[in-house]
Image: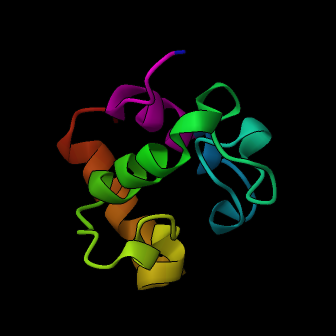
């Protein structure tokens, strides 16, 4: 099974940000659907994929229930999208 990495996450984030409602999407999920089990091929690494997602935008996981929350849920939609763009720029993906 392929590991869910920052590079994979960045590629999927760029596609997700083209969507009408990016905060209604989950980058590691198949077809970006937040209602599906995340990760498609990364299904058994759901929690790890969520950690990659949160770490990518600089969020620290403090409590067990933070571990699988979307950044949009943790910091709000506008702030999460802004942090995503800044992280993509900073890491050289855009």
Label total for image: 0
Identity of the residue furthest to the top in this view: 1
Q: How is the image coloured?
A: rainbow
Q: 63 above or below 41?
A: below
Asked whether 44 or 23 is in front, the reply is 44
Question: Residue 29, percent across and down?
Answer: 68, 43
Frontmost residue, 78 versus 2? 2
Taking the image as shown, residue 43 lies to the left or right of residue 9, namely: right
Instruction: Give how far across and how far down residue 42 sits, in percent.
Output: 59, 31
Q: Which residues are magenta?
A: 2-14
Magenta span: predominant SS is helix
Task: Decide if residue 86 is on the left or right side of residue 4.
Answer: left
> Compared to 10, does 51 lie above or below?
below
The image position of residue 11, as x and y in percent, is 49, 30
Query: Which quadrant would the N terminus be assigned to in this image?
Result: top right
Residue drawn at 46 percent across, 66 percent down:
81
Which residue corresponds to the image point at 69% horizontal and 57% vertical from the top-left? 25
Residue at 51% across, 70% down: 69
Within the image, what quadrant is residue 79 found in? bottom left
Quarter of the picture containing the C terminus is: top left
> Is 13 contained in the magenta span?
yes
Of residue 2 and residue 25, the one placed in the foreground of this image is 2
- Residue 28 % position (x, y): 59, 41
Q: Is residue 1 above or below residue 32?
A: above
Q: In this image, 26 relative to 76: left or right?
A: right
Residue at the left extreme of this rendering: 90
Seen in the picture, residue 24 relative to 86 is either above or below; the reply is below
Q: Write down the quadrant of residue 57 in the picture.
A: bottom left
Write the residue at 18% across / 45% down.
90
Quadrant of the rendered image containing residue 65 = bottom left
């Amino acid at each position: 099974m392929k590991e869910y990495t920052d590079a994979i996450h960045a590629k999927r984030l760029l596609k997700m940000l083209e969507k009408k409602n990016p905060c209604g999407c989950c980058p590691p999920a198949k077809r970006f659907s937040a209602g599906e089990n995340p990760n498609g091929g990364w299904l058994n690494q759901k929690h790890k994929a969520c950690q990659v997602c949160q770490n990518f935008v600089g969020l620290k996981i403090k409590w067990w229930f933070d571990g699988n929350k979307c950044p949009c849920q943790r910091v709000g939609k506008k702030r999460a999208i802004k942090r995503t763009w800044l992280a993509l720029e900073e890491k050289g993906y855009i």
